[in-house]
Amino acid sequence: MNIYILFIFALVPILWLVISMGASLLKAHIATFSVLLITIVLALVIWQMPVINALTAALEGALLGLWPIMIVIISAIFTYKLSVHTKSMDLIKQMLSNISTDRRIQVLVLAWAFGGFLEAISGYGTSVAIPASILIVLGFDPIFAAVICLISNTVPTAFGAAGIAVTTLSAVTGLETQHLSWFIALQLSPFILLMPFILVIITSKSIKGLKGVIGITLVSGLAFVIPQLVAAYFLGEAMPTLLGSLCSLTATILWARIFHKDKCAAASKPIGIRQAIIAWLPYILIFLLIILTSPLFSALSKLLEHVKTSITVYTGQNPGHLNFKWLSSPGTLIFISAIIGGLVQGAKIRDIFRVFIATLKQMTASTITVLSIIAASKVMSYSGMITVIATVLVKATGSFFPLVSPMIGMLGTFITGSDTSSNVLFGALQKEVATSIGANPYWLAASNTAGATAGKMISPQSIAVATSATGLAGYEGKILKSTAKFCVVYVIVLGLIIYFGSRLV
């Protein structure tokens, strides 16, 4: 069959996903499950894939979606919900809202640094919903609060939820995670430095708004980007955003306390050091456990990594191998931290169990969505659909493909609302194209994640979270219009970085 006809057939699952989710025809879990069924039918009929191979390819994808992807997301949301249950999240909100009366500094602390921290720990909308709700309490316009948090929640998502997007990218491409992490961090560094300045300018509605806060704005960006680069190079995917956001949060607060004393807010209710530590304990434990099981402590890391189960599921040629790392998975570490933190904060075992069950129920539709989309991507990959799409794209763009590479990642997040799902959809495609045009496969695969971060600010799912948190149901179109112009500039600049970078690495 002609390759261009095959190309059209190969695009059908992706186009149906765009139509069914982009136009809100179906709920996400129904849309993605239908995509899986369509993909399997195409693989059987057009690509003549044996039934057993198609089914085992889908099963491999579903298992990969369950572990380590969904276990990280479920554990992260469980940690947050348990913090809400024990009221420790109320204390955290209070501590952050007492830092400054200057709105520019409040945006840097809450939308940028704290939002980045929430993205690192849990993601899944908490990094938009919580900062936006606090900003509204502080007197910000709800639409502005939603927009500023959506724009902030871009670069931190690359390594959000303990780096699950990068772990997934590694799994679908076969590329090593630490090298991918380093390239992603490099590509996003200019944006991390610039983002605090952009947020301040948006807040004050003029570049003149930087007057008096250039120092704290620069510190907020530097304190994020330097630790992120170091963590990506030496530790891999789990720590960059977590370490960067914590350093940025700490540095921004300290700078505000030292150099902007006149704008420090009076605490409505004093919070002692012991109270503060207990409130932050689950997140402190997550940080410590991830550090202790990182390559910095290689002996412990290797010991825990040996506790795993390796299986081969796909029955066709060149099957992948699934490794279930039971103790070293970030999901396991986050879950343990939540339990210990919850107990110290006074939660009873039965309460912890109820919160966990409530989390599982809340995440049912999301689990179906993630498992379906990853299962479909595996069928597309093993059947040859991804290879066909890559071949035609190479013919169409040639050596200029790196210019549009991040746009593909952005499209994936716009459709699915998730950097992780974008990597599942297009990660293997980026690698295939890189091989075809002689580019570094790590660089282009990384660009998919970098581009995916741009899609977060325009994704219907992200906007829905923002409107829910700010009571703005019905204003989705207005918010999208506000964020879209930033997204366009973001992805164009990133495309230039990827293109010229591809000629050097």
Image (spheres, rainbow, N blue to C red):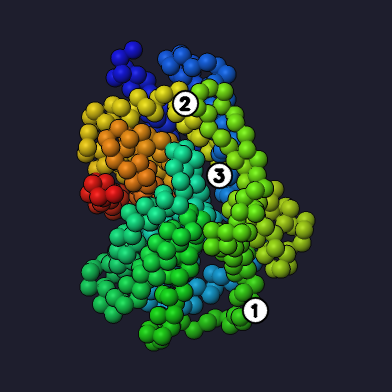
Q: Is residue 198 above or below residue 46?
A: below
Provide the residue designation for mark 3: 69
Q: Is residue 196 above or below residue 122?
A: below
Give the Cα separation between the discs numbered 1 and 2: 54 Å
At 22% from the left edge and 33% from the top edge, which residue is drawn? 398
Instruction: Name which of mark 2 and mark 3 comes first in the sequence.
Output: 3
Residue 329, can we see it?
Answer: yes
Q: Choose mark 2 or mark 3, whichever is in front.
A: 2
Does dot 1 land on a helix, a strand or a loop? helix
- Describe residue 15's horizontal placement relative to residue 176 as left or right: left
The answer to whether mark 1 and mark 2 are in CB contact below 8 A is no
Q: Position of residue 291 (x, y in %)?
A: 56, 63
Residue 411, can we see it?
Answer: no
Does dot 2 land on a helix, a strand or a loop? helix
Does dot 3 land on a helix, a strand or a loop? helix
Q: Choose mark 1 or mark 3, whichever is in front.
A: 3
Pointer 3 local density, CA inside 10 Å: few below 14, some 14–19, many at least 20 = many
Amino acid under disc 2: Tyr
Instruction: Name which of mark 1 and mark 2 comes first in the sequence.
Output: 1
* Residue furthest to the front: 299
At 51% from the left edge and 56% from the top edge, which residue is drawn? 238
User: In which quadrant is the N terminus drawn?
Assistant: top left
Provide the residue designation for mark 2: 382
Provide the residue designation for mark 1: 274
Q: Quadrant of residue 221?
A: bottom left
Amino acid under disc 3: Ile
Instruction: Name which of mark 1 and mark 3 comes first in the sequence.
Output: 3
At 62% from the left edge and 50% from the top edge, which residue is drawn? 305
**Which label sits on residue 144?**
none
Give the Cα separation between the discs numbered 2 and 3: 20 Å
